[in-house]
Amino acid sequence: MQKLLFYIIVTPGSLRFLKFAMWSMQQRADIEVALVANGLDVKEQQFLESFAEQLNCTQIQLPTNKVMSHGAALNVLLAAHQQPWFCFCDSDILSTDDDARDIPLTTELAALSSCEAMFWDDSPVKGLLGRCNQWPDGSVNLTSFFCVYQTSVIKHLVDKYGVGFENIAIKAIHDQAIRDNLKHKGVAAVNRKLDTGKALTVAMDIEGLAFEHAEIPSLLHIGGLSSWILNGDKDLVHAEYELSDQDLYELADQHSWLYNARAIEDTENKQFYLRRQQRLAAARFCFQLISHFVDNTPKPRHDLSNVALVAKINQIEAGLQRYHAETS
């Protein structure tokens, strides 16, 4: 099978920390990378162009001086895309096997999503957010971390239903079939908002198209790093940190940097807040691990009982070591 072209959208401040992951994706036998500049300043744009030349890959500049939303950026890319499959992935997804050809793609599938964040368990996530892989009624939903769509199919749906990859409030959707389908899926409130690509997933369901969410063994999604780089407390990177089971599996109390008063009050949505806390704790740990290699800041420690999670952390460190050894 011909290599799949994957768009990786690069936001301000992220490139120097996530080059190792993007580089690993370009090493794969089944993927070709296209780096997409989203709101970068002149200096970082030049940095990206130099990195794209190093990777021998395509580099694209979005028509914006500010950071464009994920969905809006994907709409721009889709409009100009001509290849049979439209593919994109987050910038913090690491490939652990150069020779892998394990993307479970068939011509019967209209779309595929993958790459849950590394610190999540296997339980389904129901809802309307980008990370939700099921609708409230338990039917299949696609996430927005790593996606492959049949280009002709998705462009047809955009034209027919008047929706794209953008985040969109249900009340702003004019197609009645989509709104009716959402009600069947347990989404009744019109003031709710659908995250990246969710409206297109509904359109595929209406059309009777096949799509699935499946994990890919050779890919590791760190999760939350771009958000941490944009919005996280950068001063924490200079502090000692030990990631513990308590950080990941127990809602934080008021003495913790992870404390969220709403999480304690809203007992009906404990799992939602716990996953948000996991994302934050793991993002800090992984960012500090990466920063240790990039800026020689203190290396974070961990005291974790989850053997599988420790193995993933070791894979990230191995990926960092390999990148710096082979590109320095």
Image: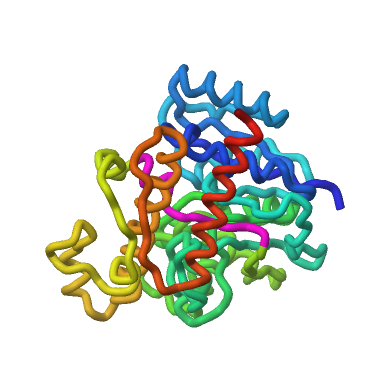
In the figure, is residue 324 to the left or right of 252?
A: right
Counting from the top left corner in percent of width and height, residue 182 is at 49, 72
**Count of labels shown?**
0
Chain part drawn in magenta:
218-230
- Residue at 51% over, 40% down: 18
- Residue at 30% over, 69% down: 273
Where residue 33 sits, quadrant-wise, is: top right
Question: Is residue 225 magenta-colored?
Answer: yes
Hey, which residue is sitting farthest right in the picture?
1
- Residue at 48% over, 67% down: 309
- Against 9, residue 264 (above or below) is below
Q: Nearer the viewer, residue 289 or 35?
A: 289
Please indicate, yes or no, whether residue 61 appears anywhere in the rendered image: yes
Q: Nearer the viewer, residue 43 or 239?
A: 239
- Against 37, residue 3 (above or below) is below
Q: Nearer the viewer, residue 46 or 295?
A: 295
- Against 295, residue 317 (above or below) is below
- Residue at 48% over, 32% down: 16
Counting from the top left corner in percent of width and height, residue 275 is at 37, 68
Please indicate, yes or no, whether residue 75 appears anywhere in the rendered image: no
In the figure, is residue 128 to the left or right of 259?
A: right
Quadrant location, the C terminus:
top right
In the figure, is residue 256 to the left or right of 184?
A: left
Look at the image and name its color scheme: rainbow
Question: Is residue 304 magenta-colored?
Answer: no
Counting from the top left corner in percent of width and height, residue 54 is at 67, 26
Counting from the top left corner in percent of width and height, residue 240 is at 27, 48
